[in-house]
Image (tube, rainbow, N blue to C red):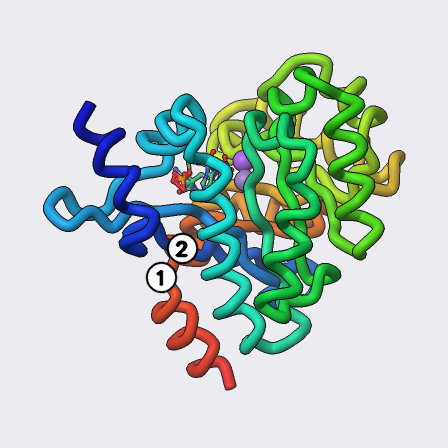
Amino acid sequence: NELENGLRTAIPRGEIVPYFEQQIDLTTNRLHGFEVLARWEHPTRGLISPEQFIPIAEETGMIADLSLSIMRQAFLTARDWDPSLTVSINISPWQLRDAWLAQKIIKVLAETGFPASRLEVEITESALFDNLALAQSIVGSLKNQGTKLALDDFGTGYSSLAHLRALPFDRIKIDKSFIMSLNSSADSAAIVNAIISLGESLNLPITAEGVEDAAVEERLRAAGCAKAQGWYYGKPLSMSGVRRLLAERR
Ligand code: G
Ligand code: G
Ligand code: MN
Ligand code: NA
């Protein structure tokens, strides 16, 4: 298949690059950090979404190399930012089957000089079931370095509450489907409020994804949501885009 063959050469050619989505602290209104989102800058097809190539990378075993390459590029650029800014990376289910994953990430941190304490790892609920003992061991090694752990896309998987106890999460990210319908659906509003209360009870701060307008942001802030991200704050930025954004803020 064409995308699969292309992907094999795309990684060494540097066509798979990190984009960065702003994460805003809703209590201070300040930039807290960025979520890293992989993009394929295809020479003829333009930007290809990770929804298209991450599954191929997983099926073909390329996900490990792809992910480490994204991390290397993201850490190299992020180490020059203000040291208060964090970096969140997405880890897919397949990667949690690699007993050396933590060691590989720690190696990239050391090689790039990016502090583990500024890194947050996002795991989706579906990623958790496969081999929980291995996931716990990987996560334990990373947390020993000071890395934070977030439960991504919360509310979309099953047994969410059991997952919350299975791993030492530092934060919950509410899936964007609930946030995007927050002001149009009473059910979504009830679910979002319930997740924020749950976070308060468990002492887990909440990040809302998919904030697209000021009304939703205001409602989240009033409900006690800690952080927000989404197109309201701008589309994900390339490395040079982030450099420009941070230069303008000085
Ligand atoms: O950026 P957005 O459409 O385009 O991302 C789509 C999906 O791809 C999201 O679920 C996101 O978590 C996932 N994703 C983005 N970047 C990465 C990555 O570097 N690794 C993994 N495993 N998933 C990613
Ligand atoms: O699954 P994960 O949450 O890691 O990936 C985030 C995905 O959501 C990316 O595809 C990103 O492009 C997309 N996204 C982020 N913010 C918004 C938003 O405000 N609205 C919409 N429609 N999509 C968003
Ligand atoms: Mn994510
Ligand atoms: Na998500």
Which quadrant does the N terminus fall into? top left
Give the residue drawn at x 41%, y 50%.
231
Ligand 2, image quadrant it occupies: top left
The local secondary structure at tag 1 comes to loop
Image quadrant of residue 24?
bottom right
Q: In the image, which disc is placed on residue 19?
A: 2
Q: Which residue is mark 1?
A: 238
Q: Nearer the viewer, residue 106 or 232?
A: 106
The local secondary structure at tag 2 comes to strand
Q: Which amino acid is tagged 2?
A: Tyr
Give the residue drawn at x 67%, y 51%.
120
Q: Is residue 119 above or below residue 100?
A: below
**First in residue order: circle 1 vs circle 2:** 2
Q: Is residue 216 left or right of residue 18?
A: right
Mark 2 vs ligand 1: CB under 8 Å?
yes
Mark 1 vs ligand 1: CB under 8 Å?
no
Can you name the residue that lies furthest to the bottom here?
A: 250
How crowded pointer 2 is (Cα within 10 Å; few <14, some 14-19, many 20+) is rated as many
Discs 1, 2 touching: Cβ within 8 Å: yes
